[in-house]
Amino acid sequence: MLLNHESITGSPKLSLPFKVYNGNRSSRIVLVCDHATNHVPKWLNGGSLGLNGSDMARHVAHDIGAAGVTRHLADTLDATAVLSNFSRLVIDPNRGETDPTLIMQICDGIVVPANRSISPRERECRLKRCHRPYHGTISSVLDEIDDPVVLSIHSFTPRMWTGPKRPWNIGVLSSTDRRIADPLLALLNDHAGLVVGDNRPYAGRLPGDTIDRHAFQSGRFHSLVEIRNDQIETESSQREWAEFLAPILRRVVDCATGSVDCQRRT
């Protein structure tokens, strides 16, 4: 059962910290988008972290384009998606509760004023009103599906703040369970000109993160997809990437779960 609106926000008028898109669909795939938005809830300093609009529009506050790709994938795959409805600068849903980077005070050289002297009470408030309801909703959605496959959609910047350019168009992240990652990488690498990263631009295992919590620890099929964000800045490009990925993801899931013979191309 999904969590009650008023019990989370304290008011029926305030926005929930998650969005469930395409609920109760036919696919066993469940899409999650941890960094879907740069939204700051009104109960937190009137909806401001003390940063200007240009900083909040950057990758530091959300994964540019990831929400659009996630929704288009959900439509194409007839799958349910759970998306965050708060900025990762409020509290990062892709971190465990004890992770030191759960609430960032400085990110990419930017000081986050509302996070500089955050008290234990305020930290607990953000956990209670954002982080836990988001993860509770993912758990509820997954519990309704027999043997679900969890696919997490993210985007990354063309380069780190002070680092070199990143050549990858797309990255597939995984830990030691590579039942989805390996066939996904194989099919992506079949496309000439596509630069594919295996656990690039990030390592695939982060204890306590969304995939670890909802898939790896319980043995569910899973993977995390990272798309370079300069390729998905517009609605049309997000749709194009979703339409490209959907048949690949569908085949990978069918192969990995034994629905089709992975040794044959059909």
Image (cartoon, helix red, strand yellow):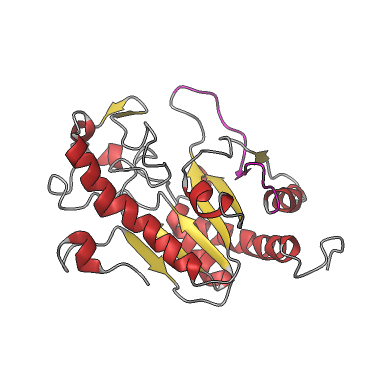
The chief SS type of the magenta part is loop
State the residue at coordinates (18%, 62%).
14
State the residue at coordinates (69%, 48%).
178
State the residue at coordinates (50%, 54%).
214
Q: Is residue 35 above or below residue 58?
A: below
Residue 229 in sight: no
Residue farthest along the left direction in this orientation = 46
State the residue at coordinates (50%, 39%).
207
Out of 57 and 138, give the one closest to the viewer. 138
The percent position of residue 140, horizontal first and vertical second, equals: 42, 66
Question: In the picture, residue 11 is in which quadrant?
Answer: bottom left
Residue farthest along the right direction in this orientation = 264
Name the image quarter holding the C terminus.
bottom right
The percent position of residue 143, horizontal first and vertical second, equals: 49, 68
Is 261 on the left-hand or right-hand side of 182?
right
Out of 235 and 220, give the one closest to the viewer. 220
Residue farthest along the top direction in this orientation = 162
Is 235 on the left-hand or right-hand side of 179?
left
Question: In the picture, residue 28 is in which quadrant?
Answer: bottom right
Residue 167 in sight: yes
Residue 163 among magenta residues = yes
Residue farthest along the front direction in this orientation = 218
The percent position of residue 66, horizontal first and vertical second, equals: 46, 52
Residue 129 among magenta residues = no
The percent position of residue 125, horizontal first and vertical second, equals: 21, 47
**The residue stretch that appears in magenta:** 162-179
Name the image quarter holding the N terminus.
bottom left
Q: Is residue 123 above or below residue 237?
A: above
Q: Is residue 162 above or below residue 7?
A: above
Out of 182 and 124, give the one closest to the viewer. 124
